Image: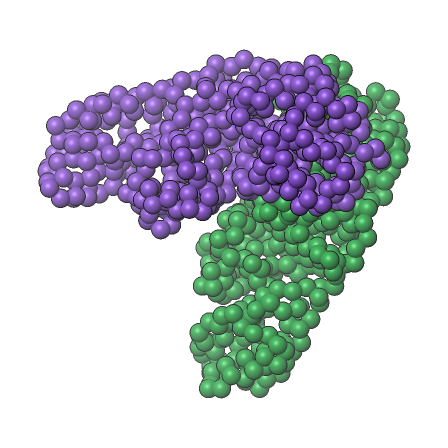
Chain colours: A purple, B green
Amino acid sequence: MSEKVNVAIIGVGTVGGGACEVLCKNTDIIAIRSTKINIKAICDLDLVKARAVSDKSGLKDVIITKNWQDIVNDPEVDIVVETIGGTGVAKEIIVSAINNKKSVVSANKDLMARDGGELLALAAQNKVDLFFEASVAGGIPIIQAMKESLAGNDVKQIMGIVNGTTNYILTKMTETGADFNEALADAQRLGYAEADPTNDIEGYDAARKMAILASIAFNVRVRNDMVPVEGITKIDSWDIAYAKEFGYVMKMLGVATSDSDGVEVRVNPVMIPAEHPLASVKDSFNAVYVDSYPLGQAMFYGRGAGSLPTASAVVGDVINATRNITNNSRGRWGCTCALTKRMKTLEESISKYYLRVAVHDRSGVFASLTSALAKHNISLESVMQRRSIGDGEAVIVIVTHKVSHASMLLAAETVRALDTVLRIESLIRVED
Amino acid sequence: MSEKVNVAIIGVGTVGGGACEVLCKNTDIIAIRSTKINIKAICDLDLVKARAVSDKSGLKDVIITKNWQDIVNDPEVDIVVETIGGTGVAKEIIVSAINNKKSVVSANKDLMARDGGELLALAAQNKVDLFFEASVAGGIPIIQAMKESLAGNDVKQIMGIVNGTTNYILTKMTETGADFNEALADAQRLGYAEADPTNDIEGYDAARKMAILASIAFNVRVRNDMVPVEGITKIDSWDIAYAKEFGYVMKMLGVATSDSDGVEVRVNPVMIPAEHPLASVKDSFNAVYVDSYPLGQAMFYGRGAGSLPTASAVVGDVINATRNITNNSRGRWGCTCALTKRMKTLEESISKYYLRVAVHDRSGVFASLTSALAKHNISLESVMQRRSIGDGEAVIVIVTHKVSHASMLLAAETVRALDTVLRIESLIRVED
């Protein structure tokens, strides 16, 4: 293989700028492993930034433009890297590039989680590649692993720490006893959380990633709007402390499961056993845990965000696309969402639950609480001592055996209506 | 893609039998993801076993033979799976299959670690694939990850728990306080260790895997006989306990490093910080930790042995080879050991060291010990209290700052010669 492949990068912010830098800095190694990859053009609305990225990367003779049409219409460009994000212009760019027979590498989780099916079909129709490793878990090579190395596996479950912001916040709360707001402020100060952190802390970001992963794992098309989310804003330091006492660690997890009844995908805070491989994933690190036949338990761990780790995924995709160009094997793998499976409702999902209830500090309370749960056929795995919180109030903490979400919600209503009960303070899933 | 690809499996023991079972059980999913894969023939010296595997997998119309020549000479066989192991007949089979223009999937670490360069060159010459994911860390897809997803990365270091037997033994010693022989016996009872455990406990098995990984990571050809090994037989429960007190965990690690001075690959017991991602890899699990630019820290975790996990890797390779056949892109990636780098000697390698010394229980001992180390420019990071062990003996435990192995050995000689010193009980590397 000696051809030169031309790449153009559209959007040289954090991710695109990183990819440019890496393609230049590691150009010799990449040439040994595949082919010489040439950055032919850089496109950004901010030409000053584009020039700065080009200079920093030591590029010469690179075309710098603010018009993406210049890129997608350039017959010499083989691969278009879309790193502007969002679902508007980014989609126009990808569609135009594919229609012009260019392979595309994108880091765009919003777009792939919503329109992945449509775009992958278009790529297949045009016999080009559309790769998007960077859209899930940054530098962790989970998409290609699922598409290739694990392609012989029947995936039963994926659990992912796929949002670094919430993992940082929960780690901070666990390790320092900080409350949610303190940990969030800390994350914002360090640049791990945005000024408006909604997307991260409410689980929307993770939902997009889980939609993409579930689609690949189960061969069904899961869009992000099919993934119910529950944020971490209500988790308090008592929950974290009780989790520890029960031998659990609190994590914000994307959970995707497939069985003969259908597919379930959700994003929510859960308690997992302290010995679970995911429990030791700390700070802003990401990890994807896969349980499949025949592989069994496996986990992929690394940096889920940041310029350089994400650039690793983008450049890996560029190399993959390059190999397919030089081997004339574009479209070697594409969309595999050939199956239709029922999406389970959140109500059907089955978990253990952690239940923290504030009660009147008097006798008979515990009996009324447990018999209310028993009425809904919910049995208890463990119960924490009542803790008096003053003013005649006490707290009871329970971990139930497995129960459907629907039953748990009904039971919670019954519990709430007990005259011995003041309020339900927390209801959090437990996975093991 | 609708062609049918024919596979033949040579050797249906643990790994080959598992691969046969998985290709049959997951045949529909595999067809969705790539192409229908047909097992055309099974070869084993034990025809009864071959028949049993075939029946268990529900195969019909499969050719069963004890002559591998029947397989490699069958023009309808597209992919040969070599799962007999060893470096004798296995090599003949692979060479013949490749010369007959068949792609080959092998789980053979002994052969790939010794003759990988030669066999990959032959595959390239014949424009076929030779894949060997199962040769390293069982089901963990580390080879393809390094060859493809991480191909844009400049790898600085790989640290691998690539031998499940030794990880099981050290985990057992750490968790139960068992001594080495007890833990080994336990591993043998559970089938994690063989009757003759030499290959595992002395590090030879891990050396083969590290040779393969280092070759891929650094683009240089490293053979297993270039990898110095140190076993775990001398590790005792005191070392495990002291490690814990210093905040370390004892692991048997393959360590491969590349910098401007050259490449270093070794296998030995080391202490790593309890917070290191590898520290939480327990029992017979394997994990490969990669530090590279731009990705940074990443880790791949899963089952490193066993019929089904290893079959995952074999089947993944078969699918990969199948895609290359149906896309006419065989040889899409092959050997990339294009560079020549100096192999560093073990003496040059630099680590912190844990040093456990039995001394006379009297004053002035500590001063003589530290000044002996200072003479060799070795400074101390931490020192454990002297522990009296009776009969006028005491123990001093030290962790040094970084020092070359050569200096440490010289210093150890000096220490050993002190009249205050009875013996050096342990000298173990510390990595952080």
Depth check: give the residue in front, A297 or A194. Answer: A194
Q: Residue B281, image x and y in percent? A: 53, 47
Q: Quadrant of residue A122?
A: top right
Q: How many marks?
A: 0
The structure residue drawn at horizontal position 62% and vertical position 41%, both measured from the top left corner, is: A18
The structure residue drawn at horizontal position 70% and vertical position 24%, both measured from the top left corner, is: A70
Judge whether residue B363 can be spotted in this image. Answer: yes
Placement of the C terminus of chain B among the 4 image quadrants: bottom right
Q: Check the image and name the residue furthest to the front.
A: A48
Depth check: give the residue in front, B37 or A170. Answer: A170
Judge whether residue B146 can be spotted in this image. Answer: no
The structure residue drawn at horizontal position 76% and vertical position 47%, both measured from the top left corner, is: B219
Depth check: give the residue in front, B323 or B113. Answer: B323
Q: Residue B172, image x and y in percent? A: 50, 53
Q: Quadrant of residue B76?
A: top right
Q: Residue B261, image x and y in percent? A: 74, 60
Placement of the N terminus of chain B among the 4 image quadrants: top right
Q: Residue B173, image x and y in percent? A: 50, 56
In the displayed structure, would residue B47 be above or below residue B172? above
In the displayed structure, would residue B395 be above or below residue A408? below
The structure residue drawn at horizontal position 35% and vertical position 51%, both measured from the top left corner, is: A176
Drawn side of residue A19 relative to residue A158, left or right:
right
Drawn side of residue B223 relative to residue B421, left or right:
right
Q: Quadrant of residue B126?
A: top right
In the displayed structure, would residue A99 be above or below residue B398? above
